[in-house]
Image (spheres, rainbow, N blue to C red):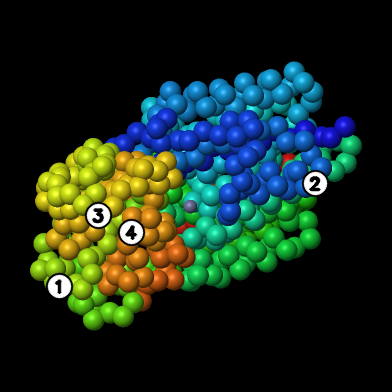
Amino acid sequence: MKKRVFVAGLVHESDSFNPITAGERDFPVFRGEAMLRRRVDNDAATGILDTLEAQGYEVIPALFTHAVPNGLVDREFYLQIKDEILTAAKAALREGPIHAVTLELHGSMTVRDFGEAEGPLLEELRSLLPGVPIFAALDMHATMTPRMFENCDGFAAFQQAPHTDQRETGIKAAQMTVAALEGNAPRLPAMAWVKVPLLVAGEQSATDVEPMVSLIREVRASEKKPGVLAASCLMGYPWCDNPDSAAGILVVARDRALAQAEALRLAALLWERRHDFSFQTEAYSEEEAVDLALAAALTAEKPVYLSDSGDNPTGGSSSDCTGLLSRLLADERTRRLPTPALFGGIYDPDAALACRGRVGQALTLTFGAKFDRKTSRPITATGVVMGFVEDWEGSAVALFRTGNVDIVLAEKHIGYVTPALFTALGRDAARAQLVAVKLGYLTPGHAALAGRAILCLSGGSTNEDLKSLPYERLPRPMFPLDRDFPYDPGEHLSLKG
Ligand SMILES: [Zn+2]
């Protein structure tokens, strides 16, 4: 009889500075067979399913759900999803044993008026399935917690930012599961976690620049050592005011001493390089960024890209701050661009839906600053609806032209990760002189088009200036908020197995 592995995915990165509560309308849920049918490129859950099936295991699919990073998650929604996963496990137990559990989690999912999402889920699975190995794939920006560590036998996190190795990470989590099930009795690895009191804005942890190039090289070298199953550099998540916030190193190995030695060594390296985290691209204040981008765009042969990094929905922000867009609309040089600038985009359900059935028509719209009302003000403008797509990854999207800027208005909280969104709305980003996107570092699709990439240090709930954030619950001392304090990795070591 095939051994049975229970698989589920619950993935979100939750920004406590973003006033939106992310819930049912943001999370598509793929239950049971639908989860098995959902196979996606560069996806950890797909890597888990493919690997377990190829190795001859019976997969019991519970559910998979994820949403673009956003504000804290709705408590009722979370409790319902957690309950569904546990109910699926109980139903599976009635039909036979569950031999192992493999999950895809993020590791920085936080629930409003509740707290961490992943620890309680792992804890309840563990108590339902005592002695059953549990493994999980995580995001590189995971925040490890004691409850997560205690209730899981091994984690493997993405090692690339942008996250191009999600499938590979899912495969690693599945392979740890397979390794644990090889013999007659489950064979659990050891795991070491060393907390590093460090906050890094995501845009400073791109893995194609230092210090991440060297750090990840070391992490991968560690993983190649005989007996090491997974080594992860967890960068944490700075945009959540969270008592568990920190970076860290996590090593899963056959042997306790090996896990400990590797985790301590890598944690010391990460701490040593703390002063070297910096932006990989040109980074300027909003005013300077717009000035430089427009000056360059007027004579550019390839698109000049401007990242609205303080309001990056893929980092957890509301995606409705209008600071950068207002500045572009107010600058007379924008009107002189040979083709309208592209702006992706503003999350405003009412404004997006007002464009439905109105392509080619003139409209006056008020949009933006409806969720995050503190950072910027709504824009009222008259323009023409240039395009409308009913279903872009589950969201209606419109292209609204005003002041020589083509602005994407989205019904849902989507990410602006690919130029294909502009293409779907009738614009070729490669032919624009200026493209502004609510992103931090450019994703590979955008980077391939960019003649120049300028990071705009704008306002919003992914503000890159961490020192300006109103933290209240963050543990201190924490670099870079606190600069000079001693750190001994050995005092921050947790060990099990
Ligand atoms: Zn991440």
The numbered mark at residue 55 is 2
Give the CA distance from mark 3 to mark 4: 8 Å
Give the CA distance from mark 4 to mark 2: 44 Å
Q: Looking at the image, which is closer to me, 87 or 297?
A: 297
Q: Are marks 4 and 1 in contact (CB under 8 Å)?
A: no
Q: Looking at the image, which is closer to me, 359 or 129?
A: 359
Structural crowding at the residue carrying mark 1, measured as other residues with C-alpha within 10 Å and reported as few (<14), some (14–19) or many (≥20): few
What residue is shown with label 1?
336
The image shows a total of numbered marks equal to 4
The residue sitting at 16% across, 68% down in the picture is 334
Identify the amino acid type marked 2.
Answer: Gln
Element assignment for label 4:
loop
Disc number lying in front (4 or 1):
4
Q: Are marks 3 and 4 in contact (CB under 8 Å)?
A: yes
Name the image quarter holding residue 418.
Answer: bottom left
The numbered mark at residue 386 is 3
What residue is shown with label 4?
426
**First along the sequence among labels 3 and 4:** 3
**First along the sequence among labels 2 and 1:** 2
Q: Is residue 6 left or right of residue 69?
A: right
The residue sitting at 62% across, 67% down in the picture is 218
Disc number lying in front (2 or 1):
1
The residue sitting at 48% across, 71% down in the picture is 209
Identify the amino acid type marked 4.
Answer: Gly
Disc number lying in front (4 or 2):
4
Give the CA distance from mark 3 to mark 1: 19 Å
Name the image quarter holding residue 342.
Answer: bottom left
Identify the amino acid type marked 1.
Answer: Arg
Disc number lying in front (3 or 1):
3
